[in-house]
Image: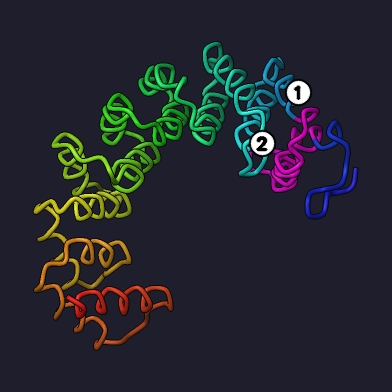
């Protein structure tokens, strides 16, 4: 079939076949998946659920990919989609499919998946644990936070990254000593983005362990938007001259960084 333009051409069956083509990151396949998500009819849902029972792991994963965001932001068939994905999660063994199932359940914000996702968090495969992170990140429960704390120290970079982001920013309303300690442990992470996400999470919670790292970063050679956000959250008065010096130094900076810097300076000057 010809490539769907803007995603609305083709029968459901034809789009499913395109979704199953290419590798996992195939652009044409993902266009077909997004078309099916936007179409969001019962026919599409039934076809996606049928894929969950296929002998091919790729087909099962694609079925979960479609179901997770069916409706493209509109709540359609939520209970039925949840039932199907929960059943997939209970019986599935292929890590790539478990990743798709966890991500899909995260989009659904499915509380019934809590216990299964917690079990998935200890899976030997990093792909599967990444699925657990996505599913747990949106669930409001002490058990999900505890699992995310454990995952924030995972050996896999992507798992640590998503878990730290979930604890630091997505769960901004949650504040416990254990959560803060988990974020503080990531300040020394070898990955600068993970360390930065932890820094913002601590700053949002006014944890004093964020103050010196922010001060040092503002005086250093590499100041990121993360550092600016952490400085704004803490509001420590002696950050203000450091921010002014950063602005006055000029030099190469993209427009977004300059915009955020000006906004943070303005917040300090309004106090």
Secondary structure beneath disc 1?
A: helix
Whether residue 195 sits left or right of residue 19 in the image: it is left
In-front residue for pair 53/252: 53
Is residue 15 placed above or below 235 in the rendered structure?
Answer: above
Question: Which residue lies under the disc numbered 2?
Answer: 70
Q: Residue 21 sits in which quadrant?
A: top right
Residue 161 point in image, percent of width and height: 35, 43
For the N terminus, give its image quadrant: top right
Q: Residue at x 80, y 38 (%)?
A: 18
- Check residue 40 for magenta coloring: yes
- Residue at left offset 24%, top offset 46%: 189
The residue labelled by disc 1 is 46
Q: Secondary structure at mark 2?
A: loop
Instruction: Determine the image quadrant of residue 242.
Output: bottom left
Residues rendered magenta in the picture: 16-44
In this view, 145 is above or below 90: below
């Amino acid at each position: 079939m010809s490539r769907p333009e803007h995603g609305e051409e083709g029968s459901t069956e034809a789009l499913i076949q395109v979704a199953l083509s290419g590798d996992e990151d195939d652009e044409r396949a993902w266009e077909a998946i997004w078309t099916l998500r936007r179409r969001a009819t019962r026919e599409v849902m039934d076809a996606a659920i049928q894929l969950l029972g296929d002998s091919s792991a790729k087909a099962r994963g694609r079925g979960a990919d479609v179901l997770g965001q069916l409706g493209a932001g509109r709540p359609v068939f939520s209970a039925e989609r949840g039932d199907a994905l929960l059943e997939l999660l209970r019986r599935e063994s292929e890590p790539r499919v478990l990743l798709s199932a966890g991500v899909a359940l995260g989009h659904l914000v499915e509380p019934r998946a809590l216990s299964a996702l917690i079990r998935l968090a200890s899976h030997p495969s990093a792909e599967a644990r990444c699925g657990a992170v996505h599913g747990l990140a949106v669930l409001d429960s002490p058990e999900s936070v505890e699992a995310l704390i454990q995952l924030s120290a995972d050996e896999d970079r992507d798992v640590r990254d998503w878990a730290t982001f979930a604890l630091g920013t997505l769960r901004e309303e949650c504040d416990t000593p254990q959560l803060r300690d988990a974020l503080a442990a990531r300040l020394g992470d070898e990955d600068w983005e993970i360390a930065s996400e932890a820094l913002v999470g601590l700053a949002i919670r006014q944890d004093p362990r964020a103050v010196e790292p922010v001060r040092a970063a503002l005086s250093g050679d590499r100041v990121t938007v993360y550092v600016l956000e952490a400085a704004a959250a803490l509001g420590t008065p002696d950050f203000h001259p450091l921010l002014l010096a950063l602005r006055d130094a000029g030099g190469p900076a993209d427009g977004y960084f300059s915009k955020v810097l000006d906004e943070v300076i303005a917040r300090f000057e309004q106090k």
